[in-house]
Image (cartoon, helix red, strand yellow):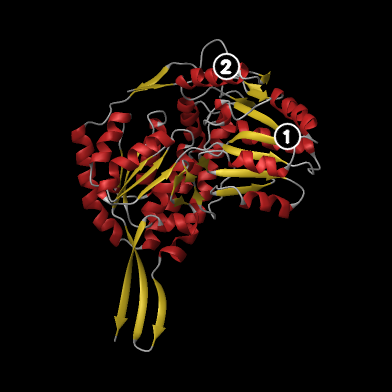
Amino acid sequence: MKIVNPATEEVIRDIQEDSPDSVNQKFKLLQVAQVDWQKITRAKRIEILRTFSDLLEKNVEALASILTSEVGKPLQQSRNEINGARARIKWLTDNADKYLADEVMIQEGNLTERISYEPLGVVCNISAWNYPYLVGVNVFVPALLAGNAVMYKPSEYSTLTGLEIERLLKQAGVPNDVFHVAVGARSVGELLLELPFNGYFFTGSYKTGKYIYEKVAPKMVPCQLELGGKDPLYVADDVADIKAVAASTADGAFYNNGQSCCAVERIYVNEKVYDQYVDEFIKEVKSWKIGKPTEAGVYIGPLSRKDQLSFLETQVQDAVQKGSKVLVGGKRIDGTGYYFEPTVITNATHQMSMMREESFGPIIGIMKVKSDDEAIELMKDTEYGLTAAVYSNNQSRAENILEQINSGTGYWNCCDRVSAALPWSGRQHSGFGATLSHAGLRAFTKTKAYHLRG
């Protein structure tokens, strides 16, 4: 398997993919090692994962360089991702005892009723390339804290980062056979679906998630899916600082080149502030530096996958044919690397694919609306349900809107953010189950009820 730098199109490294035999061997080793890992005190497991976080900090420059080289995100954004992962690890390790310890529910006379949170066993984590540290620690950190062994399959587009994660986990003290990396593309993923794991945790597209869910359903084991989004954002007519709102929402749409499941994917703006908002939005987008991700100050680097270039071109062509206006961008950038211009499209409608299908790139459609009610109906018009955002000076107004949107997360005067203290979950085609928060810690456990009399 060739690891290609999306900024230069050069092959960074050739890596041997796992074979059926090597995958099977790793799985058997995980099964054996998990038994002893479960017996290790939770305090010790917490200590090990905190050491892993310390190693991320110590090696941040080297790790960020590797991440940038294989996925193309600007170097500062790679540093930000690693630091963000450390913040999540801190919350998870700080709260592991609180949410994984046994709970006494009833203590009456000689009767004790208690809940025990046992590890699932050996879990399979099929992860994503866009934020390999962030989406990775959402799964493998709480899984390890709960006493599970983990087979971690990084995306073929972030394999080098996956191997660095494995190296540092084991340097931190995770036993060799408690965490293994499955290296490869789809064929290796297929092998994992055939094995008797005790749980599957996938981050990626709806199409692949649906396939995995259907494939593993007969096993009758937990299967959590963190899938895509077509995340809407509404700018109400009472926003005070339109320039600041435009800058914030543009960042929400284009950070990491828009390659985020919770990136803003469609914007609705009240007609009273529409013209001013669009003007400020365009100014913000035009201010960004586009270039090699290793250069200082670059905000837009290359896309991670070459095939996404033609997909985005198709979305732009469809929008133009149906009456939209391209105010900025709209095409790939000539030369070496997988570069696409940050693209702003107005006169958008829901007849255009860019307002209905996940773009996962630096493209945004903006639509004028007359009222909150019109915005609500348009925001609801989707098969996805990951996040939704409202910008308004009135909290109750914003919350009233968000309560009507079927999404796992609601934002008021912010967007495109995740907190380790809150559950990260999707609805409809955005998946189901939760990572992060107490729900994300317990997702990697099975409960046992104890009725103790005596």
Answer with mark 1 or mark 2, whichever residue precedes in sequence: 1
Residue 121: x percent and y percent?
28, 54
Residue 140: x percent and y percent?
39, 47
SS state under label 1: helix
Along the viewing direction, whichever of 15 and 336 lies nearer the viewer: 336
Residue 229: x percent and y percent?
52, 38
Along the viewing direction, whichever of 352 and 204 lies nearer the viewer: 352
The quadrant the C terminus occupies is: bottom left
Q: Quadrant of residue 38?
A: bottom left
Residue 61: x percent and y percent?
52, 34
Q: Is residue 412 left or right of residue 174?
A: right
Label count reads 2
Q: Quadrant of residue 279?
A: top right
Residue type indicated by callout 1:
Ala
SS state under label 2: helix
The residue furthest top is 335
Q: Is residue 6 above or below residue 261?
A: above
Q: Is residue 196 above or below residue 257?
A: below
Along the viewing direction, whichever of 275 and 108 lies nearer the viewer: 275
Measured in 3D between alpha carbons, the distance from the residue under mark 1 to the one under mark 2, in whole angstroms, is 25 Å
Q: For mark 1, does the 10 Å Cα neighbourhood hold few (<14), some (14 to 19), or many (20 or more) residues?
A: many
Q: Nearer the viewer, mark 1 or mark 2?
A: 2
Q: Which residue is mark 2?
A: 317
Residue 246, label in figure: 1
Residue type indicated by callout 2:
Gln
Residue 259, label in figure: none
Q: For mark 2, does the 10 Å Cα neighbourhood hold few (<14), some (14 to 19), or many (20 or more) residues?
A: some
Can residue 84 be seen here? The reply is yes
Q: Is residue 129 left or right of residue 178?
A: right
